Image: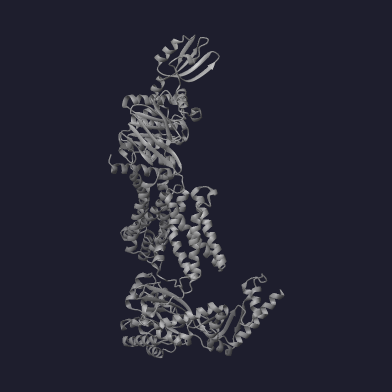
Amino acid sequence: MTSKHLYFKLLREDAKRKLWAAALLGLAFFFSLPVPLAMVLPSYQVTEYVTLAQIILRRTNNVRMMLGFNEGYPMVVVLMFFAAAVMGIATFSYLHNKKQIDFYHSLPVKRSLWFLVNLSTGVFLPAAIYLVTIVLSLIVGAVNGVLPGLVLKTAASGFLLNMLYYTLTYITVVLAMMLTGTKIAAILGSAVFFCFFPAVSVLSQTYYSAFFQTYYSGTPDILSRTLLKLSPIAAIALAMEELNPMRIISVTAAILLLGMFAFFLYQKRPSEAAGKTMAFNTSKVIIKVPLVLVFGTAGAMFFYSIEPSLGWTIFGNIVGVVLSHCIIEVIYWGDFKKLFSHEKTLAACLAVSLAVLLSFYFDLFKFDAYVPEESQIAYASVDFNKDSWVYSRNFDREMYTPDSILQQARLEDSADVLALVNEALRQMEVEEQEGDTGRKRLEGEYRHRFRMDVCYTLKNHRKVYRSYALYMDPVMETADRIYTDAAYKQALYPGLCLDESAAENIVYRGWNDNIQHLDGSQQQWAAVLKVYQEEMAAMSFSRRIKENPFGDLMLISTENIQKIEELRDTDDKEPIHYQWGWYDGYFYPIYPSFVKTIQALEDCGVEMKELVSAEDVEDITISGYGPFDEEDEEGDFAAAEWTKPVYEDDDDLLCQKTYDQIEDIEKILSACVIDEKGWRNGMTGIDGQYNLVIRVKGKGRNQVSGNFRIKEVPEFVVRDFVALDKELREKYRAE
Amino acid sequence: MIKAEKLTKRFDDIVAVDHITAEIKEGCVFGLIGTNGSGKSTFLRMASGILKPDEGSITIDGEEIWENPSVKARYFYISDDQHFFPNSTPQELMQFYRCIYPAFDEKRFYSLLENFGLKKDRKINTFSKGMKKQVSVICGICAGTDYIFCDETFDGLDPVMRQTVKSLFARDMEERNLTPIIASHNLRELEDICDHVGLLHRGGILLSRELDDMKLNIHKIQCVLKPGITPKDIVELDIVKQEQVGSLYTLTVRGNQEEIMRSMELVEPVFYELIPLSLEEIFISETEVAGYDIKALIL
């Protein structure tokens, strides 16, 4: 009998043995696909507003969503994940049982053939069940008017992709089965394979962000990014987020590599490993040491997060190392008395993890202080994080990547960037050396705090990222130079690069999301575009401190509109500029100093006005929690007393007052920033202690919210709230 | 012929089989005797290709057994605790074996099942221990292999079944030169079936001898001698063991029967009789000479 012939015979026999798995999978798939489809599809009914064609379209989209590989219906993906784990354990469970291994390995069948047969069963059986389920789903769809031909491609790609990622998970679990000798160990091993590398990635980033003030969280560190992907769970999540040919190729390669390794281990695996925790003695150390190190460093971080002192951090490190070492030894030996075995390894792990911890804690490698020499820098880029709205679904740059500006904006002359960085380091040193006193001093001297991200591209092509928190006041001129650099501005605001063909897409958005289209000719619209581009290019931080936008201009290319319209729900008949989620990143702020833009818009028939003047306001309610007086030491102490359950809930502490006198309203309005447009500036320092609700007279939206500018709270408001706060304290003290 | 040369197997610090050299010729019943932990099962598992030897080799007709399906097709292994597929019936088990052993005799299988009173479609997990062993033996016989390895298979069989199985083996030995290798710690079980026995102890082989050879060369004499004559006076009598109850001597002597009788005649005993020795008695005598307290080993 040839091997091929025997293979199919054994496959058939093995499939008979796995009928229970087929039944379970069949049930699970049945209730995941055809049944939900049969319930959902008929629920779309023809009405006077919805035609049959629309119903069929919706049903077709529904079938596509459920049969495809996407985030819209993750049920199948989740099911496949668990199926892979169960099948991985079931198909090779005989390796963990002495009776079974004696049975199978005494038979005249090569081990390689056994491996292939069991592996094949683990893949073909679920594939067959899944395929049948897809056919049933197509039938359900057809019964409800969905032509199979329209969804076949999606179903096929969904099947292939789901099976690809199923196989990845399955082969990972099989690998765990090869390395271990008991099911419990295999389950734990699988969990390690699923979580270890992502955990290391997250832990390393946590360490960087916890101990290094200048760590930039978006650092595209190849190691941490690669580590994050080294897990079937991560691979599946990333694939559902975005699938591309590279990902498919790398997953396929991973499957082949893991499969070959599993096969190699199967050949080498001794039969007597059945019943032992680990099948190979060599693998014990290889698996234990990294785990212990990770647990040690995680333990340190856990305690650091509760109490950031060196003592407790070291304690956490020791606890993490010792506990994990002991638990792993007990699992390996199956004997509680062996928990302190291999004490030399324990000591070595302790030493290494402490060394790592201390190097981070004390920044022994001078991460924070690092500044490259100007001569080493090819170019630099800076993100001042004052225009986060520009990243919102912006199709001119990759979506959802706030580090786009660091990738695109280049400053050939890095002297200004280095000047800002050196100022940031000076302020950091003040805080470090003078502690709270230094912090308060800086807070008192300066107003405008920035979080500045910097990327140095060195002449050796290495990129170095840092992030600095600093008060920009002493170096505002330098920041302005960078911000008004033409190339930098264009990289920051893609709208400044549009040509006049985009002028036809301009709309004006005023207060209350009120949209106005431009009247006039293409030439006039082009003039609006040109003049806005000039005025925005000239805008500086120094001016943004003093102004807040009162309206927006949508600047978008026709090409991008087409891209968006292809993606968004086309059943929605509302005008495109109401889809904030899609277009928000294309609305550029208009500041009061943009006089030429304002004039050009008015020439096109646009009416622009402030949302509220004092005459429009009914009243302003201000609320906040004390203490309101910075010198009020008793207030700070009293606030601590609020930890006692004297009051029913937090609202009892809330100070609130309503102002309806026009003189008060005028003063308040002149000192506040309305949320609706203010947030687009990001330069206005806000005093978060006071929250304003401004009730507007007349129809439509009748209230807006806002905050005071920092250090501009009117004195009478402060007086009133100090008194209110005192009154509340007295009241609860009496109670 | 199965040949083991310096066969060794270790499990961590324990040497389960220690440099065993042995030959198992075709056409005879080989008994592998030893206490628990002596290495019988380990030896058989290496012979079955389950365990890979750490040192030495084990071959069938010069071909290594390990990962050699063509050689492995020449034997059928019955473990002391045989695995059966969950909820399977004898018929389903037969269908599985038929895939693996092309010469599997399906007709004989059903016939034997009937003779043994076992239902082909009853779940094996409802069988008693003895019945399960019967199913294993039937599968082994019907597989049509040259060798059959039985690890403590006769334990759990009632005396009638034991005899039935022995007669089955005997028939197949005669018809197709089947070679059973039977591991057991029970000498009495193997006495009337084994042609050749090997005694294992602590991983090593103490002795390996044809049973007939052993029986031909050792005898038990019960005798009453004339007053004044002791067994020491009987010349050319190689006495292995001597016991006395009153005037009755029980002597275990080495040598062939004619020589022993000649020696006895010389002293004109009042009475003497040659009695056959059991396998157990032979072993005790042989191993006591070797310095081992066999009673402690095998009883």
Q: Residue at x 38, y 74 (%)?
A: A404
Residue furthest to the left: A2
Where is residue A615 drawn, in percent x and y? Answer: 54, 89
The number of callouts visible is 0
- Residue placed at 58% from the left, 87% from the top? A714
Up-down relation of residue B275 to residue B207 (above or below): above
Q: Is residue A383 left or right of residue A317?
A: left
* Position of the N terminus of chain A by quadrant: top left
Colour mode of the rendering: one colour
Residue sitting nearer the eye, B24 or A715: B24
In the picture shown, does residue A195 fall above or below A526?
above
Residue B145 showing in the rendered view: no
User: Measured from the top left, where is residue B15 in percent x and y?
Assistant: 44, 39
Instruction: Specify the quadrant that holds the C terminus of chain A.
Output: bottom right
Residue drawn at (40%, 25%), measured in percent from left and top? B194
Please indicate, yes or no, whether residue A214 appears anywhere in the rendered image: yes
Pick whichever, B61 or A247, lies toward us. Answer: B61
Q: Could you say where residue B179 lies in the image, as x and y percent from the top left?
A: 35, 29
Instruction: Look at the picture and state if A273 lies above or below A59.
Output: above
Q: Nearer the viewer, residue A635 or A370?
A: A370
**Residue B225 position in % (x across, y down):** 50, 11
Name the quadrant containing residue B34. top left
